[in-house]
Amino acid sequence: MSTNQRIDGARLWDSLMEMARIGATPKGGVKRLTLTEVDRQGRDTFIQWCEALGLSVRVDSIGNIFARREGRDPARPPVLMGSHLDSQPTGGKFDGALGVIAGLEVMRSLAEHRIETQAPIELVNWTDEEGSRFGRSLMGSGVWAGVYDEAMVNALPDLEGVTVGAALDAIGYRGPHPARPFPADSYFELHIEQGPILEREGAAIGIVTGGQAQVWFDAVITGQDAHAGTTPPSTRRDALVAAARVIARVDALMRERGEDGRGTVGFLQVLPNSCNVVPGEVRFSVEFRHPRTAEIESLAASFPAEAAALVAENGCTLELREKLRFAHQPFDEACIGLVRDAAALLGLAAREIVSGAGHDAVYVARHVPTAMIFTPCKDGLSHNEAESIEPHEAQAGCQVLFEAVVARAGRA
Amino acid sequence: MSTNQRIDGARLWDSLMEMARIGATPKGGVKRLTLTEVDRQGRDTFIQWCEALGLSVRVDSIGNIFARREGRDPARPPVLMGSHLDSQPTGGKFDGALGVIAGLEVMRSLAEHRIETQAPIELVNWTDEEGSRFGRSLMGSGVWAGVYDEAMVNALPDLEGVTVGAALDAIGYRGPHPARPFPADSYFELHIEQGPILEREGAAIGIVTGGQAQVWFDAVITGQDAHAGTTPPSTRRDALVAAARVIARVDALMRERGEDGRGTVGFLQVLPNSCNVVPGEVRFSVEFRHPRTAEIESLAASFPAEAAALVAENGCTLELREKLRFAHQPFDEACIGLVRDAAALLGLAAREIVSGAGHDAVYVARHVPTAMIFTPCKDGLSHNEAESIEPHEAQAGCQVLFEAVVARAGRA
């Protein structure tokens, strides 16, 4: 049974727009890179909003923020909801922010409608979901879930050599609480789909049944710097020409797997990067994703040798380090059911979907019963300043989150 | 007839090593990027050495330095010799520095042996031969020769946005003299070959008959940023995958032309350059070189359309700007003859060679009778910190420079 109590769509949208002004870019996007001064401003604003509602805020040692609303029954573990406030270098207004600000709107609606719940409810902002500054996405939830060693993560440098630990201290968000799982009832995350499927099929809600399998690599190709004008073809060891062949192969391996295939080189750095020097070194990222774990396992097994062989043909060597691998992560049937029921009771067109993107929910799901709610985004575009959604789409997603969380926490 | 007066090989080597300490890198190379503080230190040291010999130093408006030794006959235009003190980001000790320091050693030997010449002699240090900071190689000689517009060059920014003009002022090397050709008798430049030919054939001296034809492009491929995990193959417009195909094609076009072919992508920048974002933009350099002008003309005509077609197949667009093009530049027969005679008189194994690299001499030759002298370098390696030559190789090249310059200037 739906609560018949509605979240405030206008208030939700206003707060989304206010958050989007922090790190706003000229092209209408957001640049709120994790653990920067801009991220600090976003975090401070978020905490002010939470404390204004009387929520008690705590920060853990990797900077994850938890804002707690007590329940009637102190013995029950909290129902968690949230997402992330950090963005890509040229990101959009809604990737991550929607789930956090919608969770805030749920908290505001609970207060406004004077709703008490049996279980406490906690709203989470996870640190560094994007991974674009330190090269580890899902970093905060990954440390929390024990996927990443916290000491290793603290030592990771950005391109300027600033480490995660130094950045945490610089913005004052290294909290006193340990970054590890605590007893929790469940976790719900609302996020834009970041893909074209819901929009194409006219669905307002994606009932996310799990996250796809992934394998990520860091690659370094070593050849030899040489003069571009004097070095004949026979003596060249051009690391960029070798990298170009690997990039083309990654794209081909994706396309061999059809529309479910994903294969991307998103980061690449050339050394010495001078127009008349044959490049002696190229560093780049490689990632593959697929809904089926078996596809990723076979790629993880075959790609390293295949890429090394390509590179060797150019007289170069390849150093390939597997950075991340995980299997398809199914979500919790009961939690998925609450999302399905809420969409049905609200009369919203919904479909089941596997998450194409990695989300904090995928790591949280290793310890806590989890589900996700997707809403459409224009042209499926994300990680792009042109990322766009409609106010009614945000409102629908937030209402589903409200219904599912209240149902799970139990009305007092 | 050889002068039977010898330059001082030990003094030459000591000064080369002293200059190499300015911007020395841990791997034994040099990083003396043009118009930086390190470049200023190299220039200041060079000028101190020149003034200690009583040479009169002047600096022109693009930072080219001229150190003059008067001749007996004030009516005669000067014989020029020199090269450049700037280096690649990971450059060697001898690329450029050899020609400048050898010219200094010629001046020191003239003083030591109390040799007077009819014509004055001027030693030149050209600004920014490498082009690795502002993207225009042969910049100083190019402005001097009228190849580049001086106002355009002054406005060129480096990757941090510092312009050539600002950098000139910052190190105090924007001189009062106009950067344009003045009456000069001839120009001689000693340089390491930067290629494997002399070493392979056991020749001590390369008699350079000219510079090869070249065409350089700036390329920008525009696709669309998108989420790496959610964007299916059918909707991707990956600018890096498109760039990879162009890089492979540049390499193929080089190899189609055999051992005389040169084709290089040395600089490449990816945007937004985040591991889980499909790249929306890639900027890179493309250059082709060949001893025959006709080969470069045909590449300049065919490559833009061919590259655009490749890129279009990936749903991207290509913006290609031709940055530089010049034909094979023959050097002056009389000046080449003086180099040939000097090598013969000194009993040095010599062979004629076309310069694979661009050199300031190629632009100077448009206005002044010019020749170049090459000496071998280990494994043909240059634009590399491992660049290496032997003291006796430097001494032989310097002695040939001495003989040619004195013969041309005329003993008083």
Image: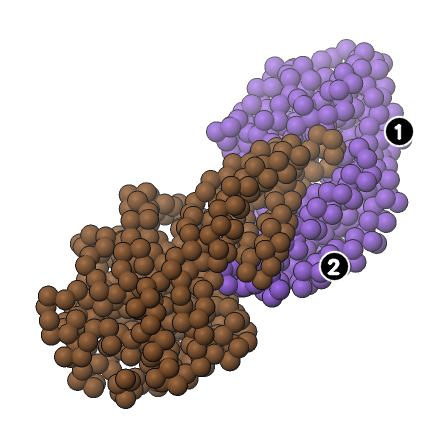
Chain colours: A purple, B brown
Counting other residues with Cα less than 10 Å from the Cα at mark 2, is it few (<14), some (14-19), or many (20 or more)? Answer: some
Q: Is residue A101 above or below residue A4?
A: below
- Local secondary structure at mark 2: helix
The tag on residue B408 is: none
**Mark 1, residues whose alpha carbon is within 10 Å: few (<14), some, or many (≥20)?**
some
The answer to whether residue A153 is left or right of residue B108 is right
- Residue A360 versus residue B79: which sits nearer the camera? B79
Residue B318 pos. (x, y %) = 55, 36
For disc 2, the chain is A
Q: Name which of mark 1 and mark 2 comes first in the sequence.
A: 2
- Write the residue at 47% across / 49% down: B215
- A337 with respect to B131 (left or right): right
- Which disc, if any, is residue A334? 1
Question: Which residue is rendered at x = 27% and y = 60% of the image?
Answer: B368
The residue wearing badge 2 is A308
Quadrant hosting residue B272: top right
**Badge 2 amino acid:** Ala
| Quadrant (top left/top right/bottom left/bottom right) for the N terminus of chain B | bottom left
Q: Is residue B313 visible?
A: yes
Q: Residue at x 41, y 50 (%)?
A: B326
- Residue A177 screen position, x and y as percent: 67, 47
